[in-house]
Every structure is written in C-alpha cells, then in structure tokens.
Amino acid sequence: MTSSDGVDDNKRATLRRFAALGAATPIAGTGFSESAAADAGESDARDAIAGYLSTTPGAHFSKIRDDLQLGTGETQHHLRRLEEIDAIERYRDGDYKRFVPAGRFDEFEKRTLGYLRRDTPRGMLIELLLNADATAGDLADALEVSAPTVSKYAGKLEEAGLLSRDDGYAVERPETVMMLVVRHADSFGDRARRLARNADQLLEYEG
C-alpha cells in the first residue's frame, strides 16, 4: 500500500522501527538527526541505517539497502553522510564493503562479524561453540553441507585467525566470538538464538 505522499507504507514502517532504534543508540550522539535535511523521510532513512547497524553490525551494502527497502543511490548517500560525521565506519571484507558503528569493534571483531554474516562459516563457528569436540563430519552433518565445503571454509576461517586446526577444530578467542553471536543473535538466525539461550552454561569463567 502506498500513502498519499508516494512512500510505501511497509517501507515507512520499517524505517520508523529502525529509526527509533537509531535515536536510542550512542550513534545518535553525533547529532546527525538534528542536522539532517528538513525532509522527514531523509531523516528517518538516516536514523534507520544507524539503528539497523546497531543491531546488524557487519552488514554489507546490499543487505542494508534491501532490508531497509531503500534505493541504491539513497543508501549510498546516507552511508556516506554517516561516515563523514564519524557515526559509522566501513571496512573491506573480500568482495564486500561492510559497515559497523564507529569505534565499537576491533579488527578481530570486524573480521569475525564478516564471517558470521556468511551462512556456512557462521554455522561452523556456532556448532563448535556448542560442541567443542565436533569433527569435520559432525559439522557437515549439522549444517547439511559436504565435507569439502567444511574443509574449504575451515581453511578460510583459519587464515582469518578465527579457527585453529592444530588438534581438530577449535574456535580462536571463543569468548569474543560467543559475545558477538549472543549480543546480535536475532540478526544471525535460529542457530544463534539457540546458542544465546545456552551461553551461560557454555562459558567457562576463571575463578
């Protein structure tokens, strides 16, 4: 359904939902909401991107555009403006340009978020956090992928510093990886939400 000003109502609802999040996050402290153009729709779109990235850090350009139902040029404009005022930062992840709230994540965390945004690597990391003794075959069965697929991504995760293959498979800096998954579980799907529900039992604290 389209309203009288030509804006799709579903898009408007999506923007307002994330704009409310953006206004309530530290990103809003940069003052971009107050200095935005007089057009309320433009302000909503910029706030929405800020709110979206607070809940979905590491999202790439196309996902931001599609999930918020924005145009390509519109998305580019607002992302550029948010970068100019140091509200967000971008980083290169292979063929992707990914975005996170500025100053929130170190390089390891940004690499981790990039892999958590990919289905198979995310599934492998989460399964290994749930079951540290999982073998390559266990991972292939759990994720319903082939053994060569697991091997391929295990190599990429090892190269990125997220996985050790010295003695089976082991997640590097598991507490950090788990924190990222749990904190943003809703943006990672059902498997991540299952991990979040069991995080207290899985974490080991040194006394």
Image (cartoon, rainbow, N blue to C red):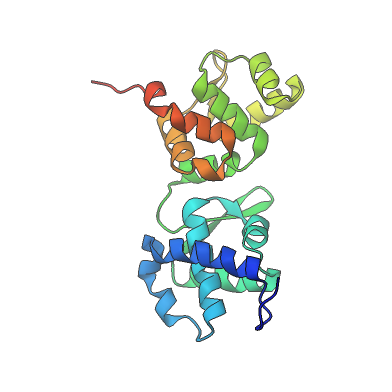
Tell which residue pokes out farthest to the bottom in this image.
Answer: 38
Image quarter (top left, top right, bottom left or bottom right) of the N terminus: bottom right
What residue is rendered at 64% in x and 73% in y?
74
Q: Is residue 78 above or below residue 37?
A: above
Task: Estimate the x, y position of residue 26 in percent, counting from the top left.
Answer: 36, 61
Q: Quarter of the image containing the C terminus? A: top left
Return the residue nearer the eye: 16 or 48: 16
Q: Inspect this view and state whether residue 100 appears.
A: no
The extreme left residue here reads 207
Above or below: residue 121 compared with residue 144: below
Q: Is residue 189 left or right of residue 153?
A: left
Q: Please give the name of the residue rendered at 51% of the width and 76% of the height, measured from the top-left corner.
A: 43
Tell me the quarter of the picture where residue 69 sits.
bottom right
Q: Residue at x 69, y 20 (%)?
A: 140
User: Is 98 left or right of 201, judged from the image as shown?
Assistant: right
Q: Residue at x 60, y 43 (%)?
A: 117
- Position in image of residue 200 (x %, y %): 37, 26
Please name whichever residue, 161 or 27, is drawn nearer the observer in this view of the structure: 27
Is residue 175 shown above or below 24?
A: above
